[in-house]
Image (cartoon, rainbow, N blue to C red):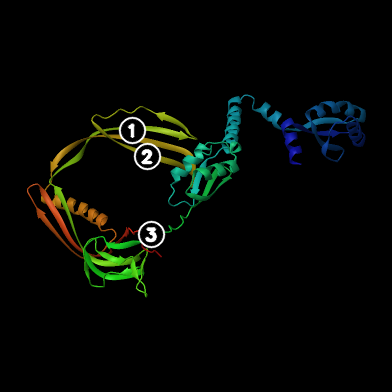
């Protein structure tokens, strides 16, 4: 029924009123002449009905034969609407263009969301899909989802599974990252566990091999901690792939020198801004920027247009450039100490990232050129490192 109403609206129709004569004969004559009539009603010597524009011009002969006098009661449909607004052609054209734009935009991808990734970046995933034709502004009808999924899975080796779901104008890329298989060591190669640095053994857990040191024993860098040589009950010798954990108390010295004379940036005050509107991949620049003199620091900002908290593929991009010069300044002791402390803490975090700090002692010494920060640390850490054992061919292995 909807399509019938739509066709009648597009072609236009007339509602008329007819008086006098014989309504039944009038209806029969219209049916014989294939003149469509619908929504027929009547009462008090008159009848109402609807017909097409062409049908209304043809009912006059039927009306004369049946003694009816038809009059127009209403005109409906697109032709009459356009005729009434024929002097507003600009408005009609604008409405037509708006409908056309909505139809075109509704067939495009507006947003792309990546879900389920942790180590693999959104940029890496989106770049692969963009190569395959999935990007903002792409036509949905031109995207072969199955083919895109197969090709993307081959290119993204770090993903175990992926799926592309397109719902309306939104595309969602769901991924599952591949879990690396645990590394299996070659247990057939004999090796020892040696000390990576000086220390005092706090605990020693031997999984395979034979302990060469005891708890509380002091060791030097390179000393044997777990031996691959194992003496059997029959006094024969076997060579194992030594494995274990050796935790020791160690001492570290971390030093950092910071100079009073430092180079700092001084902004000249010269700035330039350039704006660009990005719409479905189309970028429209606004104005021209003037390059500041000297060294330039650049910034980029992107603001996304939202509608009802839904992001739209419309961005306002801002490119900001600031001019600056580098100058050498002399810091005070307080300023130098504050900066040196921040850099020193960062250095300690890097050098002792695998150690647990038990005690620490930090000293600051000022010189003519700057300050020196030195820290003494007592730590608890794992010091065992493997070293392959060269075995002669005639020696038995297990």
- Disc 2 is placed on an element classified as strand
Please state, as top left, top right, bottom left or bottom right, where the C terminus lies in the image.
bottom left
Report how far apart the C-alphas of labels 1 and 3 lie in the structure. Answer: 64 Å
Lower sequence index among marks 2 and 1: 1
95 vs 313, left or right, is right
Tell me which residue sits at (41%, 41%) in the image.
303
**Image coords of residue 313 (percent x, y):** 49, 39
Q: What residue is pinned by disc 3?
A: 189
**As rendered, which of 378 and 205 lies closer to the eye?**
205
Among the two numbered marks 2 and 3 on one chain, the one whose residue lies closer to the N terminus: 3
In the image, is 269 to the left or to the right of 56?
A: left
In the image, which is nearer the foreground, mark 1 or mark 3?
Answer: 3
The residue that label 1 is drawn on is 273
Task: List the single residue furthest toward the bottom.
Answer: 233
Query: In the rendered structure, are the residues bearing label 2 and label 3 in contact, judged by CB atoms less than 8 Å apart?
Result: no
Mark 2 vs mark 3, CA separation in Å: 56 Å
For the question of whether residue 335 can be seen, the reply is: no
User: Which residue in the protein does label 2 denote?
Assistant: 301
Location of residue 209 by image quarter:
bottom left
Work out whether mark 1 precedes mark 3 in sequence or the reverse, and give the earlier one.
3
Q: Relative to residue 140, is residue 33 drawn left or right?
A: right
Q: Mark 2: few, some, or many residues within 10 Å (few <14, many ≥20)?
A: few
């Amino acid at each position: 029924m909807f399509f019938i109403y739509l066709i009648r609206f597009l072609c236009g129709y007339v509602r008329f009123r007819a008086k006098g004569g014989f309504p039944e004969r009038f209806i029969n004559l219209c049916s014989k002449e294939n003149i469509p009539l619908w929504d027929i009603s009547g009462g008090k010597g008159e009848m109402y009905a609807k017909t097409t524009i062409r049908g209304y011009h043809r009912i006059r002969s039927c009306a004369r034969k049946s003694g009816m006098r038809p009059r127009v009661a209403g005109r409906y449909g697109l032709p009459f609407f356009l005729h009434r607004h024929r002097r507003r052609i600009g408005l009609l054209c604008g409405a037509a263009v708006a409908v056309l734009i909505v139809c075109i935009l509704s067939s495009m991808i507006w947003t792309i969301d990546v879900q389920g990734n942790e180590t693999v970046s959104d940029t890496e995933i989106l770049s692969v899909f963009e190569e395959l034709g999935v990007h903002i502004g792409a036509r949905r009808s031109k995207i072969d989802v199955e083919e895109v999924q197969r090709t993307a899975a081959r290119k993204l080796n770090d993903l175990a599974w992926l799926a592309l779901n397109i719902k309306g104008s939104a595309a969602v890329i769901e991924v599952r990252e591949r879990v690396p298989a645990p590394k299996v060591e070659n247990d057939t190669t004999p090796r020892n566990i040696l000390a990576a640095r000086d220390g005092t053994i706090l605990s020693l857990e031997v999984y395979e091999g034979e302990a060469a040191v005891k708890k509380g024993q002091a060791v030097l860098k390179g000393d044997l901690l777990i031996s691959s040589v194992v003496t059997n009950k029959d006094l024969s010798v076997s060579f194992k792939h030594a494995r274990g954990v050796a935790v020791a108390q160690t001492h570290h010295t971390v030093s950092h020198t910071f100079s009073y004379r430092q180079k700092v940036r001084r902004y000249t005050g010269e700035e330039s801004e350039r704006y660009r509107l990005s719409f479905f991949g189309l970028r429209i620049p606004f104005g021209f920027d003037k390059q500041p003199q000297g060294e330039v620091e650049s910034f980029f900002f992107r603001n996304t247009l939202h509608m009802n908290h839904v992001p739209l593929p419309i961005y306002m991009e801002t490119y900001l450039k600031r001019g600056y010069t580098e100058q050498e300044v002399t810091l005070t002791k307080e300023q130098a100490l504050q900066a040196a402390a921040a850099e020193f803490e960062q250095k300690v975090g890097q050098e002792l990232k695998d150690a647990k700090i038990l005690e620490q002692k930090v000293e600051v010494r000022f010189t003519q050129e700057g300050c020196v920060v030195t820290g003494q640390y007592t730590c608890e850490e794992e010091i065992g490192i493997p070293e392959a054992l060269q075995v002669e061919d005639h020696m038995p292995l297990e």
